[in-house]
Amino acid sequence: MTDALTVAVLGGGSFGTAISNIIAANGPSTYLWMRDAQRAEKCRRERENPEYLPGYALHDNLIPTSDLAHAVSTSDIVVISVPSSSFREVTRLAAPHIRPNSIVISTTKGIEADTFFLMSQILEQELKDVRIGVLSGPNFAKEIIQNQFTGSVIASEHEEIFDVVRRVFSSKTFRVYSNPDRFGVELGGTLKNIYAIVTGMATALGCGSNTIAMLLTRSLAEMGRFARELGADSMTFLGLAGVGDLILTCTSDLSRNYRVGHAVGTGKSLEQALQEIGQVAEGVNTLKIVKQKADEMGVYMPLVQALHAILFDNKDIMTIVHGLMTGEMTSDVDLQGGV
């Protein structure tokens, strides 16, 4: 039974709102925590989140709140859906109130800059006596709340989490698959943001379908190669959390990262592009972090190197593109590595 459970979703952005609405519709008492008390009160009063998902009604079981301690201390499942830059801070705020043996799920796609920790690794550091999972996949919040058919992945080493998350998070239009490779699933959701900037830029430059297909497949190979060096299973990248999320994010202007790339491709500076978007584009910070890590490890990532040169070294786009097209033509598929 799901209605006997209580769930707290920390983060009142688009995805936190969409996923908490699904959970509430399945029966559990569900809290949607926001830092801003006035915003929480407005959402509670108007029964929608006008800042992020205007026009979509919040379920009656969903309680917007700014009382973190109450929401977390009364919940069996805690879902953290905040930007990666504030993930550790929010986790630390919640930690004293999380009940022993609770399930804690991260939906955040990003890497901590100073440590190269993924979000679930931060949870491991900051929390004790909890069961950790990651929810990731090709999941635009706007389409989820419109009841578009969507697939996602729950990843954890705790198999009992799979059944609970499927019951609590699934709906007639939101399907949840399982994968034990938490590290790989999380890396897939993080790395694809870089390549969405690349394809957005390519589209703005007038590149056709041939080019986008090449970029997508070479991006997948690059992601798998990097993840394998970090100890993830590169086969994970053939699933929803890998190639599925890559295709979605790299081919739709619903993606903030794609829109950043497209704006830069039209001649705007990175600062102008980010200001125009007005929301966090995780791929920009992820690019810096992954470039540094790839250099340290000696991992061949030509698309990462090229994008970094354009965004942060003020290199001419067409010069970099020409360099990519005249570089070494290596094997298409690493058969030993999976992708």
Image (cartoon, rainbow, N blue to C red):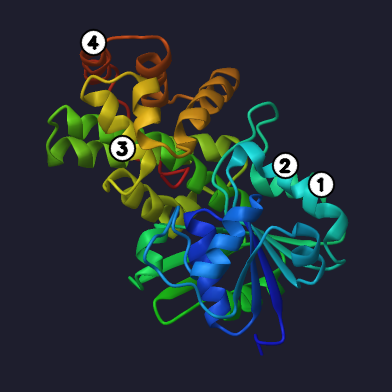
Q: Which type of secondary structure does the marked residue at label 2 adopt?
A: helix
Residue holding disc 1: 126
Instruction: Compute the Cα span from label 2 to label 1.
Output: 8 Å
Label 3 to label 2, Cα distance in Å?
27 Å
Q: Which mark is residue 319?
A: 4
Q: Residue at x 12, y 30 (%)?
A: 206
Circle nearer the viewer, 4 or 3: 3
Front tag of 1 and 3 = 3
Amino acid type for the residue under numbered disc 4: Thr
Q: Position of residue 34 (x, y in %)?
A: 63, 55
- Residue 240: % across, % down: 42, 59
The answer to whether marks 4 and 1 mark residues whose Cβ atoms lie closer than 8 Å is no
| Earlier sequence position, callout 2 versus callout 1 | 2
The C terminus lies in quadrant: top left
Identify whether 55 is placed above or below 321: below
* Tag 3 residue: 259
Q: Looking at numbered disc 3 in the image, what kind of residue is underneath it?
A: Arg
Q: Is residue 189 visible?
A: yes
The amino acid type found where label 1 is placed reads Glu
Label 1 secondary element: helix
Left or right, 260 with respect to 52, comes to left
Packing grade of label 3 (10 A; few <14, some 14-19, many >=20) is: many
- Quadrant where the N terminus is found in the figure: bottom right
Q: Which residue is mark 2?
A: 88
Vertical placement of residue 173 versus 337, above or below: below
At horizontal 51% and vertical 72% (from top left) the residue drawn is: 21
Q: Are marks 4 and 3 in contact (CB under 8 Å)?
A: no
Crowd around label 2: few <14 · some 14–19 · many ≥20 (10 Å): some
| Mark 4 and mark 1: Cα distance apart in space | 45 Å
- Tell which of 117 and 223 is nearer to you: 117
